[in-house]
Amino acid sequence: MLNDQITMSSDREPEMLRDCACVGSNSKEEHVSSSQLSRAGGTRPAARGTRRVRGTMAVSVSAALFAAVLAGCSSDSSSEEPAGGPEKSADRGPITLATGKDTTGTIQDQLDRWNKDHPKEKVTLIELPESADQQRQQFVQNAQTKSDAYTVLNLDPVLVSEFAANQWIDEIPAGDFALDKMLPSVVETGKYFGKQYAVPFNTNAGLLFYRKDLLDKVGAEPPKTWQEMKDTCAKVAKLPEGKGVDCYAGQFDKYEGLTVNFSEAVTSAGGTIVDEQGKATVDTPEAKKGLQFLVDGFKDGTFPKSSITYQEEDGRRAFQAGKLLFHRQWPYQWTLANATDGSSKVAGKFGIATLPGLDGPGRSSLGGLNLAVSKYAKNKATALDFMKYFASEENARTNLEVTSSAPPYAALYDDPALQKKFPYLATLKQSLDTALSRPPVVRYGDATAAIQESASAAMNGKKSVDDALAEMQKNLSAAIDEK
Amino acid sequence: MSVITPTRRSPRTPASRPARSTRRAGTGRLAAALLSPTFLVLGLVIGYPVVAALRLSFQVSSESIDPETGFKVTRTSFGLDNYSTVFTGENFLRPWWNTTSFALASVTLEVLIGVAMALVMHRALRGRALVRAAVLVPWAIPTAISGLLWKWIFNSEGVANDLLNSKILWSTDGFHAWASVVIADTWKTAPFIGLLVLAGLQVIPGELYEAARVDGASSWRTFWRITLPLVRPALVVAVLFRILDVLRMFDLPYLLVGPRKHSVETLSMIAFQEMSNLRFGTAAAYATVLFAYVAVVAFAFVKLFGADLIGRGTRSQR
């Protein structure tokens, strides 16, 4: 081994000598630069000419970099902003649509239709990561650098307050959009301080998926209340087929899904997370009953122990494997659980209902996506026109048909043809009618962290329900009040 | 230098000295000029961000909502509030302990397994090339991907529970979550230590072992007296790199267990959390404290074990 190394280094010696020797006959300047380059790079450049070029290139590249950074700094301080909101702008031209990864692969088709009719105002699709957190990250970065790269933003509704308060998105002329045809609870998610900042593109609400075959066996109806649900579970557990089937699961891992499920438990018990005045209200008796339901579920075995780690897909796997009697899930599970390619053991054996509550039907949290215009964008007149097209009822219908995403338009839920194709539409509309948006807090990141922190501590049994809610009330209030 | 005849040299002697030094200075200037792009780039990509982050960490911002418009009003001033946030409250000791315990536990395991791997790889056995390549596979997988792979393994219905015949919910808060991160990290980076130690093993002359055998030393004694001391320089550098790496660990616990899980939350994760909630000052303060901590640990380590980072050779340690 030692020998190897010696021969290796002795091999290299003549090469370096040769290098110096051939350079020695040239000018002294050349000598320094070439030997340094060859030492640094470790390779012998073929011709001396290229060395010079490389050297100058390095200088010019670094100079360009420096200039770019300086320019970046100066543009930051001078903050040249496009004047006025979109309604005042008459600028037209090419724009972009920034949206989370298009898992359906249909957005480009919709843009192509628009681009065909508007050759001078083309819309380019910018796909962002799939995860909502990373999308927010990109949107925030874009706003912080005051970049005009994103024109129309496809925002998670919970971000509307944050973006409006930071003045990263413009107010929208509400009259230009058919908001009155949309479900009121959904339109509400685009508002901040009574002004419309975003237009619903699609929406979403939770549904209760249940095993119809097992419920029929015990002669039970889909439950309206938590107690009914537990009673039905007890009956099914006595069936031979009920072995290994757990009662209920939602999304209980410590992530955004827990915020959704906790909010639903509280609103389904008649409480709120944040009241009309924007004050935190999780120290109320209703909130206590909501959290108690989640805590008891783990204590008395209504929820499987492993569901404390469930996100959407974990729960879906359990439901499709026939291990869950009831499952709180978004509508996307309908198509997947009905797949007859063998991936689902419950295809055709399940039904859907609205979420159960404490004394009656529960209330879901809203999901979905809202369209907004970046404050720093160009060509805002085109942006508004495009949004009118993109959020139109016709486009929403196409989207429902092709991707089964829930439209914000009320009429589509009553359309017989669509109802036939998507039997869950009527139930989904019932769920949407009473659904509430997650707390519209400017510092939503802190608010959702406060909710997840305390709720999971209670569900893990590390804190009593009262302590957890007192702590949540404190932290949520702090997040709302700002520093 | 070209040949200069003595006759021409002698009359010029008084003048030639300044000329030579000018030329040397000129060469120095030229070298500086040629290196300046490198320094410029280094200054821009390393110097400026460090200084900017340090400055940011002293920038205290207070936010309020304008009751009329609902717009956020931010006022900034300079002070030590960010650092007092870092050093008070529950958010300090826990990540501090997590960061340190990850470093201690996983580096210890990695050294034991890595050295064992190196010894196996060093042995001239059949299929040595295959063993070496196989050992390096975990190291070649990006951390993010390995985090996701281990997430599947530690799923409640995953392989880990199946093999252990247990029902541990790995991704919930607790010691098991901490352990799962240590296991995944060890799996990934033990080969790194193995590889560096292997490089160290290969420069140990065979005569030493022959001499030891002649003297009748047991293989255990040979390991302690010959292998370990001679492989130490390589091992110490490898361990130092690993410690620096683990102290700033972010991706593995973030992906494998998830954000805001107390038992695996490291200082970098808290800095990230603060940053994504737009509290850049606090985030910078956390990052600066972490920077200082890593620097102190690295310094102490170099002092204690004499890691040879700048290539002085092994002489200085004696």
Image (cartoon, rainbow, N blue to C red):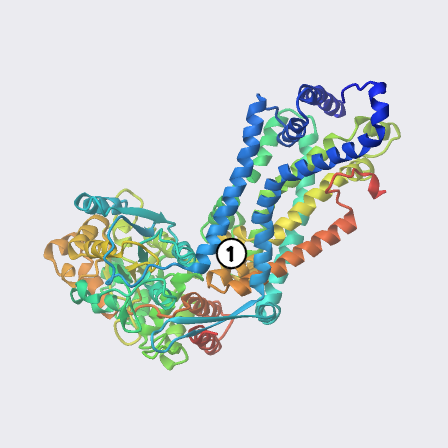
**Relative to residue A334, is residue A287 depicted above or below?**
below
Type of amino acid at the residue the image marks with label 1: Ile
The quadrant in which residue A7 appears is top right
Residue B120, image x and y in percent?
Answer: 68, 33
The quadrant in which residue A4 appears is top right
Q: Chain of mark 1?
A: B
- The residue sitting at the left extreme is A416
**Relative to residue B50, is residue A119 depicted above or below?**
above
**Relative to residue B158, is residue B58 depicted above or below?**
below
Residue A400, image x and y in percent?
Answer: 20, 53
- Of residues B42 and A235, the one nearer the viewer is B42
Residue B259, image x and y in percent?
Answer: 49, 59
- Of residues B193 and B315, the one nearer the viewer is B315
Element type at marker 1?
loop
The quadrant in which residue B122 appears is top right
- The residue shown at (75%, 42%) is B308
Q: Quick check: B31 left or right of A301?
A: right
Query: How many neighbours does mark 1 have within 10 angstroms: few (below 14), some (14-19), or many (20 or more)?
Result: some
- Of residues A17 and A162, the one nearer the viewer is A17
- The residue sitting at the front extreme is B11
Q: Quick check: A245 left or right of B227?
A: left
Name the residue that disc number 1 marks.
B168
Residue B197, image x and y in percent?
Answer: 70, 37
- Of residues A33 and B53, the one nearer the viewer is A33
